[in-house]
């Protein structure tokens, strides 16, 4: 189970880096001040499911609004939404599925169930708990066959 938790953490780190890179690059391209700081904040808050993306995205959009007005804020919002949608719906299930040896649909289903029953904390715990349960069942099958 510790090995699974380590793979989950590495998968989350890869996803956080992709988010931070995409959003930081997008903010830099449209001229939002401090794109590096936005990228670092995005990376750090990516470990908090749902709420982290909302907080870091809001920070980037507000910086864009203060610096360049509504048009730049809408462009920043579009960048955040596009990166988050691609990451959340395409990349995360595959990256997490490979990291914790679960099918991408199982990862997506676990996230939905975790969020439904326990909110943000449930989403945070859903994938590692599902992976740990799958690893325990696999180990039990191996022990049952050999014993």
Image (cartoon, helix red, strand yellow):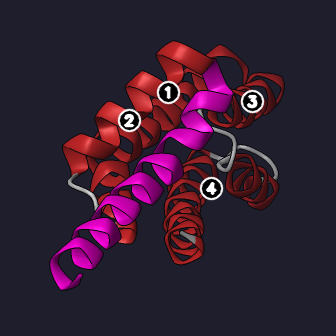
Q: Residue at x 32, y 67 (%)?
A: 140
Q: Which residue is mark 3?
A: 55
Q: CA distance from mark 1 to mark 3?
A: 20 Å
The front one of 30 and 131 is 131
SS category of the residue bearing label 2: helix
Q: In this view of the protein, can residue 98 be seen by the observer? A: no
Identify the mark at residue 33; answer none if there is no mark: none
Considering only order in the chain, which callout, 2 or 4, is on the residue closer to the N terminus? 4
In the rendered structure, the answer to whether residue 5 lies left or right of residue 136 reads right
Q: Where is mark 4, residue-wise?
A: 24
Q: Is residue 15 left or right of residue 91?
A: right
Q: Is residue 102 above or below residue 31?
A: below
In contact (CB < 8 Å): disc 1 and disc 4:
no
Q: Is residue 6 above or below residue 8?
A: below
Which comes sooner in the sequence, label 3 or label 4?
4
Give the class, few, some or many, for how many residues have Cα within 10 Å of label 1's Cα (few <14, many ≥20). many
At label 3, counting other C-alpha atoms closer than 10 Å, the crowd grade (few under 14, some 14-19, many 20 or more) is some
Tell me the SS state at disc 1: helix
What's the mark number on residue 110?
A: 2
Name the front one of labels 2 and 3: 2
The reply to whether dot 1 and dot 2 touch (C-beta < 8 Å) is: yes
The vertical placement of 25 against 54, above or below, is below
- The x, y position of residue 102, in whole percent, is 27, 58
Which dot, 4 or 2, sits closer to the camera? 2
Which quadrant of the rendered structure holds the C terminus? bottom left
Q: Magenta segment, which residues?
A: 119-147
Q: Which residue is under mark 1? A: 114
**Extreme residue in the bottom direction:** 146
Residue 66 at x, y percent in the picture: 83, 24
**Which residue is rendered at x = 41% and y = 56% of the image?**
131
């Amino acid at each position: 189970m510790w090995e699974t938790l380590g793979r989950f953490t590495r998968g989350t780190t890869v996803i956080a880096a992709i988010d931070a890179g995409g959003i930081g690059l997008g903010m830099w391209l449209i001229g939002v001040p401090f794109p590096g700081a936005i990228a670092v904040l995005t990376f750090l808050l990516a470990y908090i499911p749902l709420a982290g993306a909302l907080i870091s995205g809001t920070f980037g959009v507000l910086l864009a609004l203060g610096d360049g007005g509504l048009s730049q804020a809408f462009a920043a919002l579009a960048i955040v939404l596009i990166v988050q949608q691609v990451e959340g719906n395409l990349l995360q299930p595959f990256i997490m599925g490979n990291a914790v040896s679960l099918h991408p649909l199982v990862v997506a289903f676990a996230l939905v169930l975790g969020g439904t029953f326990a909110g943000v904390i449930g989403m945070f715990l859903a994938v590692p708990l599902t992976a740990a349960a799958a690893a325990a069942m696999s180990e039990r099958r191996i022990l049952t066959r050999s014993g």
